[in-house]
Image (cartoon, rainbow, N blue to C red):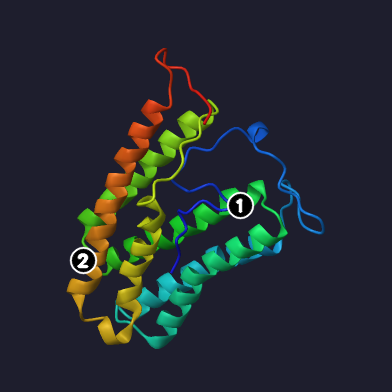
Amino acid sequence: MSLSDQPSSDQPSSDRVGSAPGDQPSTERPGGFGPSALLTPANLVTLGRIAAAPVAFAMMLTNDGVGTWALLALWFVLSATDMFDGYLARKQGSTRSGAFLDPLADKVLVLGGFITLAVIGRFPWAAVILTVAREVGISAFRTYWGRRGLSVPASSLAKWKTFIQLGAVGWTTWPTFTDWRWLSDSWLWASVLIAWVTAVQYVLAGSRATSSTGEATKT
């Protein structure tokens, strides 16, 4: 499972305000890819994660939330390949498209998995709604300040957020633990708590990063 909120050379954290493109040094490496490249190996892995996600959701619906070994294997691959595409990006050069696609893939997996399991009654809707609200709010926050050239780095706690979220879904896909609802529910609510704690951290960090006149200062 993935520590996808951890900043890497391929992506800013999905919970970090993006700085202006002009403020980033070129990450092109000899024999690698420049920032404007699109169909890089890292991006192809990320696109594969996005394309395969609906298959996992369909398997959850078909099995009415009962874990199977095939579903467990697929979910593990979808979660773990986040580290692989990050490795490829660091080795071959980061891209702007990768910085967009990688956190998008994580959100597709997390929110899609949460909503699917809520539809079949496996996850409580309250936890899902709180998670979606947090993601929408932080995305709006990031967009607002990103347009002003402000960059707010991810907190150490946020680096674990997606790992816990993917783990909450992962326990339901594992046949041995499917009926252990307390296990997946404890990870689910832990992820909700961490998500909102880090949301407050980002808002406070963004406020501290502005000048007394309300103008953004680059960090």
122 lies above or below 13:
below
Q: Is residue 45 above or below residue 94?
A: below
In the rendered image, the vertical position of residue 76 relative to residue 214, given as above or below: below
Residue 63 image offset from top left, x and y in percent? 33, 81
What numbered label is drawn on residue 76? Answer: none
User: Residue 203 falls in which quadrant of the image?
Assistant: top left
Q: Quadrant of the N terminus?
A: bottom left
For the point 23% across and 57% down, which residue is it? Answer: 125
Q: Picture coordinates of residue 54 (x, y %)? A: 47, 68
Does residue 92 show up? Answer: yes
Task: Determine whether, in the image, residue 40 is placed left or right of residue 119.
Answer: right
* Image quarter of residue 184: bottom left
Q: Position of residue 120 (x, y in %)?
A: 27, 70
Give the numbered dot on residue 186: 2
Residue 121 visible somewhere in the drawing: no
Q: How packed is label 2: few (under 14 Cα within 10 Å), some, or many (20 or more)?
A: few
The reply, left or right, for residue 28 in relation to residue 210 is right
Q: Which residue is mark 1?
A: 9
Q: Please state which amino acid type lies under the numbered disc 2.
A: Ser
Q: Nearer the viewer, residue 181 or 124?
A: 181
Say which of 203 and 117 sits in front: 203
N-terminal-most mark, 2 or 1: 1
Looking at the rendered structure, the secondary structure element under dot 2 is helix
Count of labels in the image = 2
Structural distance between the alpha carbons of marks 2 and 1: 32 Å
The image quadrant of residue 209 is: top left
Q: Is disc 1 placed on a helix, strand or loop?
A: loop
Q: Local crowd at mark 1 within 10 Å, few (<14), some, or many (≥20)?
A: some
Q: Residue at x 39, y 14 (%)?
A: 212
Farthest residue in the right direction? 31
